[in-house]
Each structure stands twice: as C-alpha cells, then as structure tokens.
Image (spheres, rainbow, N blue to C red):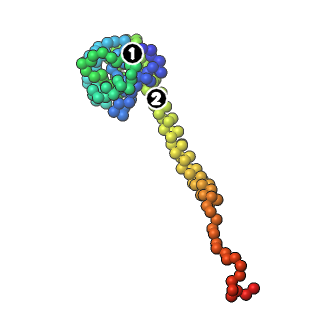
Amino acid sequence: MDISIKNLEASIYMLRNQKVMLSQELAELYRVEPRVLIQAVKRNMNRFPADFIFQLTKEEFDNLKSQNVTSTWGGVRRATPYAFTEQGVAMLSSLLRSERAVQVNIEIMRTFVKLREVLSTHKELESKLHSLETKYDDQFRVIFDAIRALMAPPDTVQRSIGFKGDEKT
C-alpha cells in the first residue's frame, strides 16, 4: 500500500465516534503480518489503554466489509480486527522501529492533522452559514410579507349604486 495522504485518508474510519485505522491495513502499511502487529501490541498492552485500541465487534466488522465492497479484507478470520485511534497509531511507533514504520507514522500523523483541519474548516463554514441565515432571515421575511400583501385581494367595500331614497343631494 502506498503511503500517500489520499490512500491514508481512505484507511481512516469513523467507529464509535472516533477516527480509527484497522490493524490489517496498518500491518499492510508497515509491511508486517497482521498477527505480528497484534502480537507486538499484546506484549505491550500497558501502552494501549482502551481509548488507544479496541477490537471490533462482529457486527461492526460486517458493516465495514459491506460498505467497502472493493476491500481486500477477504479470507477466513478467527478474530475481528483491532481499531487504533490516533493515539494508538502514535504508540505503535514506539514498538515498530523500522525505517518504514517511522515514515508510515509520520505520514499517518500528517493525515490525521489534515483531517482535523478539514473538519475544523467545515465547522467554521457551518457556523458562518447559520449566522448568515439568522442575519438575513428578518430581511427576507419583510420582503415575503410585502409580496404576500401585494398578492392579497383588495379590501372590498360594498358601495351602493344610485341614490338612496332619503338622502338629500
């Protein structure tokens, strides 16, 4: 797998309201067997609290597989993959010390930072749009009220035609 930011972005998923990368994709990036990666983690579990790593449920994994039809996640698995949060991926750098691991971690950290910037920009735009809607809502309401007034039928006053018998002219 290439280490480009575009490829890394495609390997980051939202699970349990967290951005995560899966163990099999990390193993592919680091060019190690998934079992080797997980063994290294299990030997050092004190470095991986629950907010750094968690194992997917079968339902989560099946859902991800159904969303990623073109994935290479095939094959028989005895266990569901592990999900590493940004902090979990950073902690992997202390376990995997090859030159490849160093370069992969640098690119992964850059990708997480880029995603945070994009999300921040999105939130800022959303906030500005809401502000504009609030600001211009009253001005447009006046215009719509004026259009409705022009569209309403005129007040009809019944005027009598001719003269009334007891009126003096």
CA distance for labels 2 and 1: 19 Å
Q: Earlier in the sequence, mark 2 or mark 1?
A: 1
Label 1: element kind: helix
Q: Is residue 57 left or right of residue 19?
A: left
Q: Is residue 7 left or right of residue 43?
A: right
Q: Which residue is mark 1?
A: 29
| Category of crowding for the residue at label 2, using alpha-carbon neighbours closer than 10 angstroms: few (below 14), some (14–19), many (at least 20) | some
- Tell me residue 13's x, y (percent): 39, 27
- Tell me residue 28's x, y (percent): 37, 14
Residue under the point 42% across and 14% down: 1
Task: Pick the residue in front: 76 or 34.
Answer: 76
- Tell me residue 80's x, y (percent): 28, 22
Task: Pick the residue in front: 98 or 57.
Answer: 57
Residue under the point 56% across and 51% down: 137
Q: Which residue is mark 2?
A: 115
Task: Pick the residue in front: 124 or 109.
Answer: 124
Residue under the point 43% across and 21% down: 8
Amino acid carrying label 2: it is Leu
- Name the quarter where the C terminus is drawn: bottom right
Residue 52, can we see it?
A: no
Residue that protrudes farthest toward the right in the picture = 169
Q: Is residue 107 left or right of residue 145?
A: left
Corner quadrant of residue 39: top left
Residue 129, can we see it?
A: yes
Label 2: element kind: helix
81 in relation to 152, above or below:
above
